[in-house]
Amino acid sequence: MGSVFHNVQSVLENYQSAVHEKNVEKFLSTYASDIHIYDCWENWECIGISAWREKATEWFNSLSDEGVFLKVDFNDLVVEADSYIAFVHGAVTFAAHNEDSGEKLRQITNRFTFGLKKENESWNIKHEHSSLPINIETGKGIFNLK
């Protein structure tokens, strides 16, 4: 994919800007080719960059169809890293804004965990897990606890 990320922060910044730009290839450059994702959207898991490309393309196309862009904010991040392995967890807020007016329309906050590995001098996400707390009575996710 061509991008080289020399530190964990640059991976997170690329993630933010790629989502904002709805740039699938830039977004995918954040991930290792053998990515394994546990996500809270309809599927138990997503394995491999090809499967993740399909999901990311659908996601970004749906945002374009709706006429919105997303701003991504990382909050309460904890980053632990050594020379080749990093662990990141925190809250990630996705705020949808109208493409024309810039008006904020909605937002959700998920809990995220990223496992990163440094290979060929570049950091990439090898594992991602996003989740929401669940309301025990309704069985529904709680999107805006934070």
Image (spheres, grey):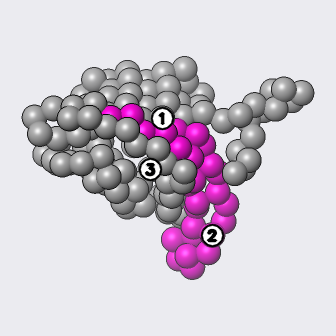
Report the side of 2 relative to 130 (left or right): left
Rendered residue at 32%/52% (across/down): 9
At label 2, the amino acid type is Lys
Find out whether the residues at labels 2 and 3 contact each other: C-beta distance under 8 Å. no
Which quadrant holds residue 66?
bottom right
Distance from the alpha carbon under mark 2 to that under mark 3: 17 Å
Q: Is residue 65 left or right of residue 141?
A: left
Q: Secondary structure at mark 3?
A: helix
Q: Which residue is mark 2?
A: 104
Rate crowding at label 3 as few (under 14), some (14 to 19) or many (20 or more) other CA atoms within 10 Å: many
Secondary structure beneath disc 2? strand
Residue lying at the far bottom in this picture: please name it: 101
Name the disc covering residue 60, or none.
3
Q: Give the numbered dot on residue 113.
A: 1
Q: Residues within 10 Å of mark 1 (few under 14, many from 20)?
A: many
Residue 109 within the magenta-colored segment of the rendering: yes
- CA gap between label 2 and label 1 equals 26 Å
- Along the viewing direction, whichever of 8 and 27 lies nearer the viewer: 8
**Kind of residue sitting beneath label 1:** Thr
SS for tag 1?
strand
Which amino acid type corresponds to the residue marked 3 in the rendered image?
Answer: Phe
Of tags 1 and 3, the one toward the viewer is 1
Along the polypeptide, which appears first: circle 1 or circle 3? 3
Q: Main secondary structure of the magenta part?
A: strand
The crowding category of the residue bearing disc 2, from other C-alpha atoms within 10 Å (few below 14, some 14 to 19, many at least 20), is some
| Residue 105 painted magenta | yes
Coordinates of residue 144 in the picture (x, y in percent):
72, 50
